[in-house]
Image (spheres, rainbow, N blue to C red):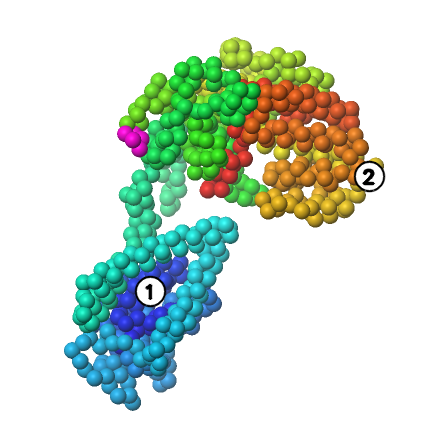
Amino acid sequence: MSWRCVICLVFVALTLRMLLGHVNSRHGRSPNFHVTCGVDGCAADYRVYNSFFYHLKRKHTAFLASGRPPRRSAFPYADSTRLGEENYDIPIFHGCVTSDGTRAAPSQQEGLDGWDTVPEHGHTGTQNPVEETGQDSNLGPMPIENPENLGEASFGVFGHSLTQHAAAFSLNVRERCYLSQGNVNSVVADVQQYQASLLDNLRGQIKNTFDTHVGNKEKLQTAVLAVFDDFKDPFTKVSSTHLQDSSIRHFFHPVEPEEVVISQTACRVKGGNSRALTIKTNSFYYVPLFKSLEELFSDPRIFTMISCIPKRCKEGFLYDIADGEFLRHHPLFSVRHAALQLILYTDEIEICNPLGSHATMNKLLMVYYTLGNIDPKHRSKLSAIRLLAIARSRDLSQCGVDVILDRIKKDLDVLYHGVKIQTAVGERTMYGAVVSICGDTLAQHEFAGFKEGVGFALCKCRHCECTADDMQTNFDENFFNKRTVERHLRQCFDIEKAKTEFVKNNLKTTYGINRRSTLVDFPGFNLIEQTPQDIMHIILEGVAPMEIKCVLKQLTISGLVELEAFNSAMYCFPYSPLDLRDRPCPISVSTLTSNDNRLKQSSGQMLILLKILPFLLYNIKESLFVQFIIGLVEITQILFAPVISLQTVTNLKELIEQHLKSFKQLFPENNIIPKQHYLLHLPSQIMALGPMVRHMCMRFESKHRFF
């Protein structure tokens, strides 16, 4: 007697256990899984396969042992719906196939009250019964018209079925889980790897079985089938959230975050007709730095890379952080060249609809870190960027971000003086310190204690004390008074000792400082020099959109460029396969005439637009506006370069100064914005901390996709 699955109507099994294994592996983990037992009229229904299987073992042990189909099933048949969304509200044992190939069908007389069942001896009344033998009839083979075409027939039927289920699986993953096509491809690739491993495992067991039972056909058949019967589905250990978490902790040993309490408030919670007094706890989660480093260093390849002294680029060139002047004079890195170089990044993300009524309710503050000791080609991978802390922004509204910085400082103080960490080659004493804190202007000013909105401050820069008026006329970094840590601490002290709130607010506006940040207490950390500007936010989301918009507006007004022709040329440009995914969007008339400084392009699109803009405007290259844009492109190329010579840094300073002067000459009615002023500090930051791409936020922001 054979068994056919009534869910997919394709799979045929020789034994009941094989059928149950198929239901478990193919259908058991579907979100719509719902089966009715139907054994001898049993009305129990289940949405979890494990519960259904244990029900069979408890209530229908005899039937499970004999493998005979149920006498009657008192539930109607429900047709399957479209591919990938099967309807499981049917008796699981409906329509079993007997040894003569006859499939049980619904009784015309009983209608929806029951089903015709297979006779006890596995044959129908009009067919010749199967001869009884000593062998279990359940193990008998299915009748095949042409045995010589067994392999070809099996491949045609079952191969098509597998392809159909694979297509349904990929469709379900994409549509029900709302995954991108790239993530769907990754899931399918992982399933293929698991499938290959499973087949290798079964192939090895069957080979051993053949080697053990040579010459005994019956025992060989029984032993081969036993391999499939005894197969334990590994997914049963991860069928629920609890089992998944337990298995992950057992096999992969993830670093458990610790909850740090920020504050506790008393509030009343409604319970029934009364309101009970309870304590509400505000907290954030912190991933212990040392445990995170231990997990990272458990990989021998990572530890080998970390333990090596960073190689400096040849004289006269800058390639990485170690080539900058700052680390050469740092109290820790100048003595211990292999010390850990921690790069921190902070940003706020909105996990809900930013335009909805709950836009700010679930905003999160994220803190990541990576190691500057990792080679840049590996450092850019998302796996090298690790979560350090996460908190709700509304929980930090009262106490500020210093509570997070205090917890980070606690670990950094220990790491600075050496801490024993378990690595892939045993316990080692590791040293380290923060080399930079990256982020956009808002996030960096919040962490460093400066005015978050620079428009409300007299001094609008965290690197110098420039004013809005000086910003419009002076384009030399040396003209402005540079901020220092000593001067910054004196200004913080003046703000804290102000006698009245009015004087305190005036001092905050004058200095551009809100508070004394915990960052000044980080070991070996310079608040002014180690918070570099981010070229993604400065160039791609600030200077480039504003200046390109001004140029295009002037060129269209003068008649040198038609916007429709420009968009057509931009669309038809022969992009490379890597650039095609970030092809710039057409620029509308409303976007060009708006009063803001935006072009409605993403950072990646702006980078591609800067690359192709000289080609799009080649026919009018003699125009001063086009020459101005070419100057911006040249500056961008230097800032995004992975290797920079010292001579190029000197030229960059002159290019930026000349570029800002040209802007004021071509657009005298426009003001220099703070992001344009920040360009003046980039050459000195390159000299101190290496190329700006080593501190760019673009790869850090890609990590947000996980949340």
Side (left or right) of 516 relative to 154: right
Q: Residue at x 39, y 73 (%)?
A: 152
Q: CA distance from mark 1 to mark 2?
A: 69 Å
Q: Which residue is mark 1?
A: 23
Q: Amino acid at mark 2?
A: Leu
Residue 332 included in the magenta stretch of the image: no
Res. 413 in view: no
Query: Residue 529 at what x, y percent from top left?
Result: 53, 18
Q: Residue at x 28, y 29 (%)?
A: 426
Q: Quadrant of the N terminus?
A: bottom left
Query: Residue 444 at what x, y percent from top left?
Result: 53, 26
The stretch in magenta equals 422-426
Instruction: Assign the magenta stretch its main secondary structure.
Output: strand
Q: Which residue is mark 2?
A: 560
Residue 132, by quadrant, is bottom left
Residue 278, by quadrant, is top left
